[in-house]
């Protein structure tokens, strides 16, 4: 693994999960590993958990994190090769990424999708331009189509909350939202859950079908009630339409999970990557109950990042 | 003391002042105390002194400070419990504060008042929601109604500049301003000055009466000239009306202190928390004279913060 | 040298270049030098390279850097002494700089010109107000009229790429741009190149004459083709008019360097401070060729800053 951008193999995932759980128990044990090394955390979009947890992970490993809010503190970046830069963009990613690559041992980058240019988003264009031109290992802090550190933390959380021998039944359910939201978390969660060998059912209203290149191996069940039956883990997430790209094709409030949705899944745990719109995506009732694993997931973000950075440094 | 949000007792104030003065003389002496501990500095509003001094204080104690400009780098926060989040707010303080609490050993938070919703401001609603949901010690970096780190630095500064046996006469005088300014500094200075046993006179034009729950024990004198007679320390500050909440009810330029105001207080020192609008709140003449303690106050902010963090860690 | 704001002497320049090259080979060798010292990096304008490289330089020397985006995170500053602050500015530089000077051992400041008030810009007014009121050593991170850390990195880069006995022929050529750009980089490069004893030719369309107080000792040649003949190093940079201050008086695309401009300078290296507008200032063809030293220059920014900070600390 040079870069950390997606699920690669079950064995690598298992290694990273194991290491993350080890760091959770022993956060400072590898304080010497990153000594004299620097990680540049580049944000093209807002961030709370990712921003803080990545810095903490780096510090736990003895590294020096430097944060750059590229959108606010730096220069507007041109992404297209060959562009004649006589408009709003001030610096080409070709130059900026190369400079950052020469300044840091590892780069970590957040680059959301446009949700308007499907081809560019599917190619993970902005993120991959950084990978292409920086010349150093790059960690995704959420790209147009994936959020692998979130998924790694999610897999840790499932493992910590599952002790039975059989596979857990994991359900990914679409939830209502008032804005058009990227597919990154849904894609990555699907990719990692299937890759880690769990049993995955995806449920959503018609029109919200995800990219089939991610969902192969999952059961698709458009009836939410059926999908939730006997669920062990229910991952709640909104996403905009993929086919009618970036659109909100319906907002059916009945899809918001409340306690009554769990009538046939009494022991199910509920997960969400946060930020969550309370009482729109998920009810207070659920989020404030013992079903909710959202705080565990958020806490695990530190150790997921620490595991990945450590793996790259080793 | 779990949180540091206000004046609690004279004995605690004395302890904190003494420790702050000790750190001023020995800034790095407790470098080992905060090793491996993290403080999250959360800003919902702009900051210069508070931002820098809190980081320096933490570093002096060996802690790792991480700064979050929540208003610019993170997500718009919902403060109201039970809210249906189908409008502009993206994350509930219930979730964000809990995550931050799980990431940091101490949180330090700045949350200005609205000056439009008196009840919410008086309840210190935003700040207290962080206290309620974070689960870790919280330090106020200025809330809707108090600015206790400023007041602690102010008390240090008075103590350093007063060697006589009798109590100093301290005067808090309203000053003109072009904007509606919060009551936090005036409230806190009043609370701490009275609590520390100094003799406090408050003077302001009619209509600028402060919240009576803070001013009990102070002498109110609406004639500024009389109030300033024989003053030892004159604290200059604007605030908006409290009764006609958040309004500018008059701007009488004659309230701006100049040298001629000190005809009956020849040795008086002048204090201000900064930022100060020169030649509106206070004349250049005063600020650039040896009456002015404003730079000492600002410098003491480092050691006030260091004392408080140290006390919480111990 | 107390402050680092401009070229002072060839001997100092040689010392700083030598030390910078030494640090490039041994970045962490002086880790103990800055222990317990703090540098405040104050940005009134955007920055990528300068922001990152200055922090890295400080960390390499064991110092603690704290970054302040004054324009976004702090208060709007008043620069004029005696101002009656009843408008948009919230804090006077007199107070802010003094506070920052009391908080940090060194300040590093970026303050771009207005390009509208020529007298203020020529006096380097904003930058010099910080110098005047802070009371500590100040490093320029680009002021209205100079960018000395860039020039120091440029001189390093020329030295690393020149092994012949004779002086290199250095050419500074104006390049097209769509915006009115400051003179700081052009001025400083001129000042340092002449000061370091290189042979400098400056070329630009009529109307783009630089401030004569910088260009004394340089050959001015308005015919770009002639100027480039036998060049060893070609520094490409846009600037707005100096006489018709801050204006774009012409944009002749033929001034953009492409490979065909090098017909009589086959071995010439090309330099630019970045950010560069590709295919406006400089063609992709040149930037992506082995002529280009722009990445070396950017990398050298770390060691230039490290050399200067080290010199001030010693």
Image (tube, coloured by chain):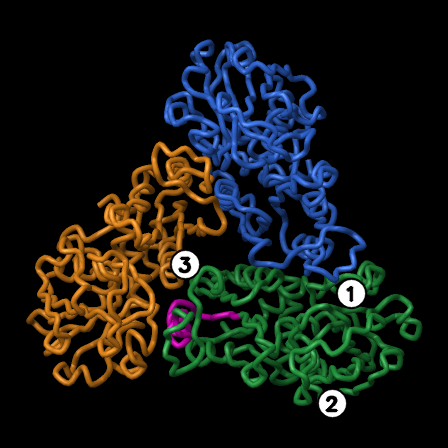
Chain colours: A green, B blue, C orange
Q: Same subunit under labels 3 and 2?
A: no
Q: Nearer the viewer, mark 3 or mark 2?
A: 3
Q: CA distance from mark 3 to mark 1?
A: 38 Å
* Chain of the residue under the numbered disc 2 shown in the image: A
Image mark for residue C151? none
Residue visible at 59% across and 27% down in the picture: B189
Q: Of helix, strand and loop, which one carries label 3? A: loop
Q: Is residue A58 above or below residue B310?
A: below
Q: Of helix, strand and loop, which one carries label 2? A: loop
Residue B31 can be seen in this image = no
Is there CB contact under 8 Å for labels 1 and 2?
no
Where residue B304 sits, quadrant-wise, is top right
Q: Is residue C11 above or below residue A237?
A: above
Q: Of helix, strand and loop, which one carries label 1? A: loop
Is there CB contact under 8 Å for labels 3 and 1?
no
Q: Which residues are magenta?
A: A91-109
Q: Nearer the viewer, residue C23 or B219?
A: B219
Q: For mark 2, what is the residue?
A: A217
User: Residue B226: where, in percent of width, then height?
Assistant: 54, 10
User: Residue B255: where, in percent of width, then height?
Assistant: 51, 22
The reply, left or right, for residue C19 in relation to residue A228 is left
Task: Look at the image and tell me in which quarter the C terminus of chain B lies.
Answer: top right
Q: Is residue B167 above or below residue B146?
A: above
Q: Nearer the viewer, residue B305 or B48?
A: B48
The reply, left or right, for residue C286 in relation to residue B194 is left
Q: Nearer the viewer, mark 1 or mark 2?
A: 1
User: Residue C80: where, in percent of width, then height?
Assistant: 35, 38
User: Residue A31: where, in percent of width, then height?
Assistant: 52, 61
Is there CB contact under 8 Å for labels 3 and 2?
no
The magenta stretch spans residue A97: yes
Q: For mark 3, what is the residue?
A: C46
Q: For mark 1, what is the residue?
A: A280
């Amino acid at each position: 693994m040079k870069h950390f951008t997606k699920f690669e193999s079950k064995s690598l995932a298992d290694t990273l999960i194991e290491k993350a759980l080890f760091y959770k128990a022993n956060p400072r044990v590898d304080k010497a590993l990153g000594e004299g090394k620097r990680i540049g955390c580049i944000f093209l979009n807002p961030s709370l958990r990712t921003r803080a947890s990545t810095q903490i992970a780096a510090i736990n490993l003895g590294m020096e994190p430097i944060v750059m809010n590229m959108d606010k503190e730096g220069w507007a970046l041109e992404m297209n090769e060959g562009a004649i830069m006589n408009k709003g963009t001030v610096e080409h990613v070709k130059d900026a990424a190369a400079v950052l690559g020469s300044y840091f041992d590892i780069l970590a980058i957040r680059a959301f999708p446009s949700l308007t240019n499907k081809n560019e988003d599917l190619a993970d264009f902005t993120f991959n331009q950084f990978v292409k031109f920086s010349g150093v290992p790059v960690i995704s802090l959420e790209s147009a189509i994936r959020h692998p550190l979130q998924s790694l933390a999610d897999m840790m959380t499932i493992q910590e909350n599952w002790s039975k021998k059989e596979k857990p039944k994991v359900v990914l359910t679409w939830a209502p939202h008032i804005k058009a939201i990227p597919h990154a978390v849904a894609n990555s969660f699907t990719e990692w859950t299937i890759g880690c060998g769990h049993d995955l059912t995806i449920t959503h209203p018609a029109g919200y079908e995800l990219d089939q290149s991610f969902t192969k191996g999952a059961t698709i069940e458009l009836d939410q009630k059926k999908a939730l039956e006997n669920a062990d883990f229910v991952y709640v997430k909104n996403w905009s339409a993929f086919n009618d790209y970036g659109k909100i094709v319906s907002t059916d409030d009945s899809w918001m999970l409340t306690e009554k949705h769990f009538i046939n899944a009494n022991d199910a745990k509920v997960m969400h990557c946060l930020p969550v719109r309370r009482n729109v995506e998920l009810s207070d009732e659920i989020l404030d109950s013992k079903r909710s694993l959202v705080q565990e997931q958020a806490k695990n973000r530190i150790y997921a990042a620490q595991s990945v950075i450590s793996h790259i440094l080793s």
